């Protein structure tokens, strides 16, 4: 369990982490989300004792990280996937890490096997691709067989195969009862991996809830309907007590209906002789919900035109 | 904002396998690090080779000139210094590179954060790095200085003034030149910890070891006489390797005195580096 209380980090006048309090519970994949610059990496560095907090505390299994007797046994952390030890081979690098905590040499070969780097273990890490560096970083986190794993943006820059591999690995680690804390700036990335989400923006806590709750909260009630007779349907919906809106810049004949269920809309259309070409709930995509949630906390605006659009216009639907 | 309750909390894992972050383990780890990169072998080979090459070139040259030398020159000839001074003068150039890289290479690759995550006791990591580097450098510097000495004396045999280790000050000069090289490495290591940049630390090290003593020569001579003994670099080497004191500036401290001055600078940098290493965000 990782527990932060009032965690604050200031760099000169900028405040990177602002009074964060959260608990990361065992046996779950917890997604740590926020736009770039939200303070995710700083928070992780504070957890690991790499940076010192300006105020507040953070503990790992009840102790500040630097006081853990066997840090590798308790926490495995991947900070910067691009960091490789240059002229050193994967095997020597992992051995040097293992030795600090008295982990036997055979464990090095085990983790090289787990991440699929056995064949290149003797090669200098300078020439590794991003995917290979990533695997090397993950191998290092597994050395001590820790109960807690912390990954900072582990899929950044990876190809689809690499992303799938990391996703599967995180799920299987959680299935073994481990705590997985993984940061990302992409909500869609977490949708299939995380059980729980902690969302931050500008260093402040925005949401701390289960994934199911997050989805439920952020899903609009709107149903998307496409029909060659939108006006007839709109009237029928209004009579039945629902509301409909023509989506601004989507296909002609597309309506977003709220206040009625799919079944009710289908029945209404049938009763009024309106032909339907499409009828489906418009779950606001998680990405969009996430963007709305963090919209006020994005550090650098780039004049995004879509920010002006009305909600639920089907950016990804 | 409902937080998931910790009902599923498992009992804290007991490290029954005895994995513990330890001083001994960190020393082993640092030794693995230093011996698993090629640059270590290159720089250490260059260190010893530079000393030996100097000794061969200089002593062979002196031996061939010997029959034509004036009595005055013969009197001032220091066979020990001739053979080991190269190790100190050239070796310091080389060891600065290795001493700097020991710490700064971890900053440039980003591996320092991994190192500090597996060994979060920063003082232990810092001390282990410095110790392993110094030990490895010491072994090679000693090899280099003794090889330089014996090869040089063999080449000077024809002059009948070649030195032996039992003569006064000779052992001190041979050991001192090796120790000086190690100190230069630690000097650079400390600068590396302070500046956290390879280029910055190397520039600063060369600046202190070479530029400062040269610039000081621009001072009025009466000032220079007072300042000289406190400077790092060339005259320290001269004081340590000289066995006859006739060629030595009278303003310098004794050999070990000069050594202590330079050792103090190194100690200050190492301590300052340690304090910053512990205090700063990594």
Image: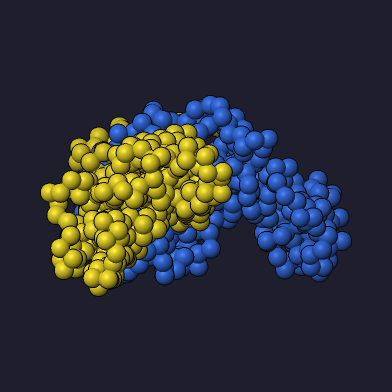
Q: Is residue B37 visible?
A: no
Q: Which is more toward the observer, A139 or A83?
A: A83
Quarter of image, res B260: top left
In the depicted structure, whether residue A82 falls above or below residue B60: above
Taking the image as shown, residue B275 lies to the left or right of residue B87, namely: right
Residue appearing at x 87%, y 61% in the figure: A231
Q: Quadrant of the N terminus of chain A?
A: top left
In the depicted structure, whether residue B254 falls above or below residue A247: above
Quarter of image, res A26: top left
The chain drawn in yellow is B
Residue appearing at x 33%, y 62% in the figure: B43
Q: Is residue A54 visible?
A: yes
In the depicted structure, whether residue A129 falls above or below residue B22: below
Q: Which is more toward the observer, A281 or B264?
A: B264
Taking the image as shown, residue A10 lies to the left or right of residue B205, namely: right
The picture places residue A30, in percent across and down from the top left corner, at 48, 43
Q: Quadrant of the C terminus of chain A?
A: bottom right
Quarter of image, res A204: top right
The picture places residue B12, in percent across and down from the top left corner, at 30, 33
The chain drawn in blue is A
Q: Which is more toward the observer, A234 or B63?
A: B63
The picture places residue B199, in percent across and down from the top left corner, at 51, 56
Taking the image as shown, residue B201 lies to the left or right of residue A119, namely: right
Taking the image as shown, residue B49 lies to the left or right of residue A266, namely: left
Residue appearing at x 28%, y 67% in the figure: B69
As drawn, the residue found furthest toward the left would be: B166
């Amino acid at each position: 369990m990782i527990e932060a209380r009032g965690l604050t980090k200031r760099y000169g006048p900028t405040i990177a982490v602002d009074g964060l309090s959260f608990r990361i519970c065992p046996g779950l994949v917890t997604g740590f989300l926020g736009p770039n610059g939200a303070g995710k990496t700083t928070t992780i560095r504070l957890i690991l004792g790499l940076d010192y907090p300006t105020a507040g505390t953070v503990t790992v299994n009840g102790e500040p990280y630097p006081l853990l007797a066997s840090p590798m046994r308790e926490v495995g952390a991947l900070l910067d996937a691009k960091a490789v030890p240059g002229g050193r081979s994967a095997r020597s690098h992992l051995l040097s890490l293992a030795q600090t905590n008295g982990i036997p040499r055979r464990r090095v070969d085990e983790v090289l096997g787990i991440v699929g780097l056995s064949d290149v273990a003797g090669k200098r890490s300078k020439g590794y691709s991003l995917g290979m560096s990533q695997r090397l970083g993950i191998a290092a986190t597994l050395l001590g067989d820790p109960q807690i794993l912390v990954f900072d943006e582990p899929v950044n820059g990876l190809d689809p195969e690499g992303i799938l591999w990391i996703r599967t690995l995180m799920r299987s680690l959680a299935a073994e009862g481990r705590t997985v804390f993984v940061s990302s700036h992409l909500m869609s990335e977490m949708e299939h991996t995380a059980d729980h989400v902690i969302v931050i923006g500008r260093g402040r806590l925005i949401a701390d809830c289960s994934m199911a709750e997050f989805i439920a909260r952020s899903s609009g009630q709107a149903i998307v309907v496409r029909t060659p007779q939108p006006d007839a349907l709109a009237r029928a919906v209004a009579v039945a007590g629902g509301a409909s809106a023509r989506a601004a810049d989507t296909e002609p004949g597309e309506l977003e209906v709220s206040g009625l269920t799919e079944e009710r809309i289908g029945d209404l259309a049938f009763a009024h002789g309106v032909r339907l070409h499409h009828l489906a709930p418009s779950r606001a995509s998680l990405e969009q919900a996430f963007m709305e949630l963090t919209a006020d906390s994005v550090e650098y605006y780039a004049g995004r035109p879509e920010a002006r659009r009305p909600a639920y216009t089907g950016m990804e639907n | 904002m409902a937080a998931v309750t910790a009902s599923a909390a498992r009992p804290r894992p007991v490290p029954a396998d005895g994995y513990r972050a330890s001083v001994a383990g960190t020393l082993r780890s640092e030794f693995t690090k230093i011996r698993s990169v090629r640059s270590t072998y290159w720089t250490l080979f260059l260190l010893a080779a530079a000393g030996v090459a100097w000794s061969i070139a200089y002593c062979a040259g002196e031996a061939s000139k010997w029959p034509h030398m004036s009595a005055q020159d013969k009197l001032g000839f220091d066979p020990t210094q001739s053979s080991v001074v190269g190790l100190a003068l050239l070796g310091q150039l080389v060891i600065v590179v290795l001493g700097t890289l020991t710490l700064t290479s971890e900053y440039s690759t980003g591996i320092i954060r991994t190192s500090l995550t597996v060994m979060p006791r920063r003082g232990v990591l810092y001390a282990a790095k410095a110790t392993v580097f110094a030990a490895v450098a010491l072994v090679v510097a000693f090899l280099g200085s003794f090889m330089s000495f014996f090869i040089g004396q063999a080449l000077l045999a024809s002059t009948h003034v070649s030195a032996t280790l039992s003569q006064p000050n000779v052992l001190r000069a041979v050991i001192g030149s090796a120790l000086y090289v190690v100190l230069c490495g630690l000097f650079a290591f400390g600068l590396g910890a302070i500046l956290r940049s390879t280029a910055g630390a190397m520039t600063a090290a060369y600046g202190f070891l070479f530029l400062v003593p040269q610039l000081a020569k621009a001072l009025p001579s009466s000032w220079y006489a007072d300042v000289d003994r406190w400077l790092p670099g060339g005259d320290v080497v001269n004081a340590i390797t000289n066995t006859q004191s006739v060629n030595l500036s009278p303003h310098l401290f004794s050999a070990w005195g000069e050594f202590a001055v330079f050792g103090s600078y190194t100690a200050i940098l190492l301590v300052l580096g340690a304090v910053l290493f512990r205090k700063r965000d990594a």
